[in-house]
Image (spheres, helix red, strand yellow):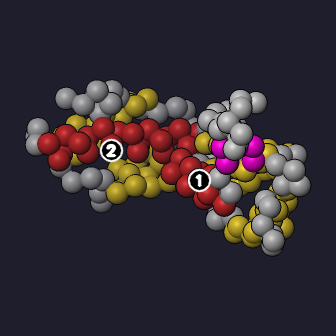
């Protein structure tokens, strides 16, 4: 049995879970998320504890067992606490500002990059640190990855957009001497 899939999910107070028509809907203080139920995977809610079981031990169904449990857990955590990722901009003259519902990034190109912020995601800017937050773990991670992809950190000077705490492997320049 899946190690992830067999562990139960406890639903915190203030979070409502409904399972109907093969759609799992989770509602909490921060919002509502829903996910279609995977075929041959059974989801039961009893006494504020969600258990996920599978119909048989076929490899494709076993692979989806832990996935379904992880998706439900992410929805429960998202509507009760939310998710966030922090990005940091490093570089001389690199700036970020919010222009309405867009991010205006000045990261060394000849023009400013305008990145539209999707609905359900909030971006806070404090100096050179951006915090991407929302209730959907997938959407927060996707937006953070797209912003980072605009100007990935380069290995020589470490300039670019990177996650806070990300370690960039540095290379020495042409001369070959270590800095």
For disc 2, the marked residue is 68
Decide if residue 20 is in sight here. no
Q: Earlier in the sequence, mark 1 or mark 2?
A: 2
Q: Secondary structure at mark 1?
A: helix
Q: Would residue 69 be found to the left or right of residue 54 on screen?
A: right
Image coordinates for residue 154, horizontal then vertical, percent? 67, 48
Decide which of 47, 157 is in the foreground and name it: 157
For the point 29% across and 57% down, the residue is 22
| Label 1: how many Cα within 10 Å (few below 14, some 14–19, many 20+) | some
Could you tell me what secondary structure mostly forms the magenta stretch?
Answer: loop
Query: Compared with residue 6, is residue 157 higher up or lower down, i.e. above or below?
Result: below
User: What's drawn in magenta, residue-wise?
Assistant: 153-159
Q: Which mark is residue 145?
A: 1
Estimate the spatial distance between the alpha carbons at disc 1 and disc 2, rounded to whole Å: 23 Å
Q: Secondary structure at mark 2?
A: helix
Image coordinates for residue 102, horizontal then vertical, percent? 76, 67
For the point 48% across and 45% down, the residue is 75
Q: Residue furthest bottom?
A: 111
Which quarter of the rendering shows the N terminus? top left
Query: Compared with residue 127, is residue 164 higher up or lower down, i.e. above or below?
Result: above
Give yes or no for contact between labels 1 and 2 (Cβ–Cβ under 8 Å).
no
Q: Which mark is residue 105?
A: none
Query: Compared with residue 54, is residue 119 higher up or lower down, i.e. above or below?
Result: below
For the point 23% across and 42% down, the residue is 63
Q: Would residue 173 be found to the left or right of residue 99 on screen?
A: left
Q: Is residue 137 magenta?
A: no
For the point 79% across and 59% down, the residue is 107
């Amino acid at each position: 049995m899946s190690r992830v899939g067999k562990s139960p999910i406890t639903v915190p107070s203030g979070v409502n879970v409904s399972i109907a028509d093969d759609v799992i809907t989770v509602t909490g203080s921060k919002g509502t998320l829903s996910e279609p139920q995977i075929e041959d995977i059974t989801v039961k809610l009893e006494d504020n504890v969600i258990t996920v079981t599978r119909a048989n031990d076929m490899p494709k169904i076993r692979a989806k067992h832990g996935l379904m449990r992880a998706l439900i857990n992410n929805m429960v955590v998202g509507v009760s606490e939310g998710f966030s990722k922090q990005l940091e901009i490093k570089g001389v003259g690199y700036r970020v500002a919010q222009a309405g519902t867009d991010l205006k990034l000045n990261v060394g190109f000849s023009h400013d990059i305008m990145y539209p912020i999707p609905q359900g995601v909030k971006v806070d800017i404090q100096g050179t640190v951006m915090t991407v937050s929302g209730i959907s773990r997938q959407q927060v991670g996707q937006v953070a990855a797209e912003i980072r992809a605009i100007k990935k950190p380069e290995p020589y000077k470490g300039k670019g957009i990177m996650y806070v705490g990300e370690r960039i492997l540095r290379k020495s320049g042409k001369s070959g001497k270590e800095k």
